[in-house]
Image (tube, rainbow, N blue to C red):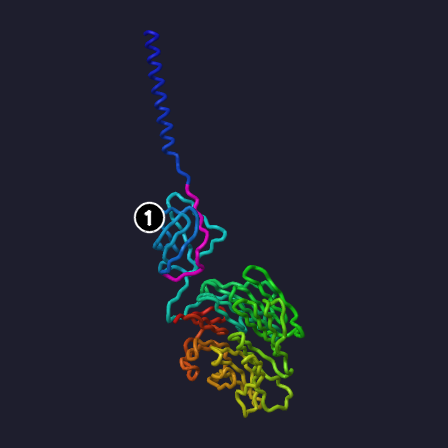
Amino acid sequence: MTIKNYFSIFLFVAVLISCSSDEDNDTETVNQPVPPTEVTLQAFEQPYAYVNDQVTLVGTNFTTNASEIKVLLDDIEATLISATTTKLTFTIPAGTSASPFVAIEMPNTNVSYADTYQPIAVVDNTKGEWITYPFYLEAINAVRNIQATGKEEIYFSTEAKREEGGGTGIMKVHNTLNGGVSIAFFNQAYAFTEENGDFLVGPQGGEFLLGSNYLSYLKADGTQTIFEDFPSNVNSWTRGLFVDENEQTIIIGSAEGRIYKSTNGAQSFDMIHSRESNTYEFLSFYAHSENQIWLAGYTFPFPENLDYYPAKQLRLKDGVWLDSAVEIDPGNRTRERIERIKFIDGVTGYASAYIVDLDTGAEKYVLIKSIDGGDSYEIVLEEDTRIDDFTFKNTNEGWYASENEIFATTDGGSSWQLMHTSSTSCKGILYNDGILWVITDGKLLKYYF
């Protein structure tokens, strides 16, 4: 064989080896696995929803091909409405739990949850049924105040039951921003552990905490003002406050009847009404507007030789503070005490009161009604058990809680019907935007109309 033939064979073999190597490289390139896409679930655009509501989940690296996405809530597939690289919109499926686990399935992805991620709350809004959410708190002596800030958003303060032998029941402020699915402590930027005080969430989102002789005002922007030691009122008991739309005018009422007003957002206060005597105490404060305010309470049981101790009222009417007795059951040897007062408007209002017979010690609880702004009252309800709280939708429809029972009226208090019996004691009640809320020992109850 010639050298030329050897060289031809060598070239042929080299070409075969080269082609085989290229094919191997091509095969390796084709079979190289594609790294998975990192998908992050960041947050829902709303804190709660009802079944069949559309909700939007914000995240990263979603595919826009809706056919490749599956959204699962508690392993129940949701109906996907739209998909972008950062947002998935879908409907809440029936059967979803109150705090569902949300999972996203996409081809070749790793799904993680951002530290800011919170599961959406699915609120049961079935009409005509009592809905229960657990409320894990020690036994409640009283609910001092309830405020609604939205349809499914309420704040409420509880006073714990006192220890045997007396002592102060510690107050705590709570809120739920998702219909009761989760209940948290209110952002208490200042110590608020006294029996006497109140809270309010202002129209601009400011958080007001009122103690015995101080006011903490935490603005929505995070700045805080703490006003302590109201002039001539050190160690006084404050009962409630009013805040205007701009959170500039603030009016505070005390147990002794001293009234303080700020027109500069709690930077300074002036006393605009002083106590007239030391023979009474106010227990409840209610403001319908800056010019319509009521405080109510009782006359001290001294001197002991009086035949009658009427309830007490202080109200702002036509720019004038009027201090007067409220004679609930005149003509009898009784001691009377208004415990809560609320006005539906500037004319019609209700108050719950306690009455004790000075001779026999017999006790009764009454609900009284005024249709003239507080000039006069009449009894519309008598109970042997305490009226823990009451609320009204309008001048005709209302509810009250007494121990384990909830009663309703549709005729302004002329008649009452038992609506519900709770397994635990009811302490606070509020109607707002088609929902009746009830705070009980260990539960939050809701009823949708």
Question: How many residues crowd around disc 1 within 10 Å: few (fewer than 14), some, or many (20 or more)?
Answer: few
Q: Is residue 126 above or below residue 365?
A: above
| Rendered image quadrant of residue 254 | bottom right
Q: Quadrant for the C terminus, please.
A: bottom left
Snapshot quadrant of residue 141: bottom right
Residue located 37% across and 58% down the image: 54
What residue appears at the point 37 percent right and 47 percent down from the top-left corner?
A: 64
Q: How many marks?
A: 1
Image position, residue 193 (x, y; %) = 60, 68
Q: Nearer the viewer, residue 157 or 372?
A: 372
Asked if residue 58 lies left or right of residue 362, the reply is left
Q: What residue is pinned by disc 1?
A: 67
- Relative image position of residue 376 (x, y in whole percent): 51, 86
Residue at position x 36%, y 49% in the image: 69
* Residue 401 visible within the image: no
Please check the rendered image and state whether residue 40 is part of the magenta-colored stretch, yes or no.
Answer: yes
SS type, badge 1: helix
Does the stretch in magenta take in 399? no
- Identified by mark 1, the residue type is Ser
Q: Residue furthest bottom?
A: 331
Q: Name the main secondary structure of what is drawn in magenta.
A: strand
Residue 235, position in %: x, y? Answer: 66, 73
Measuring from the top left, give residue 41's x and y in whole percent.
44, 50
Looking at the image, the residue that sits furthest to the top is 2
**Residue range corresponding to the magenta coloring:** 36-51
Q: Nearer the viewer, residue 255 or 316?
A: 316
For the question of whether residue 411 can be seen, the reply is: yes
- Does 367 appear above or below 167? below
Which of the two residues, 256 or 164, is positioned nearer the viewer here? 256
Quadrant of the image containing the N terminus:
top left
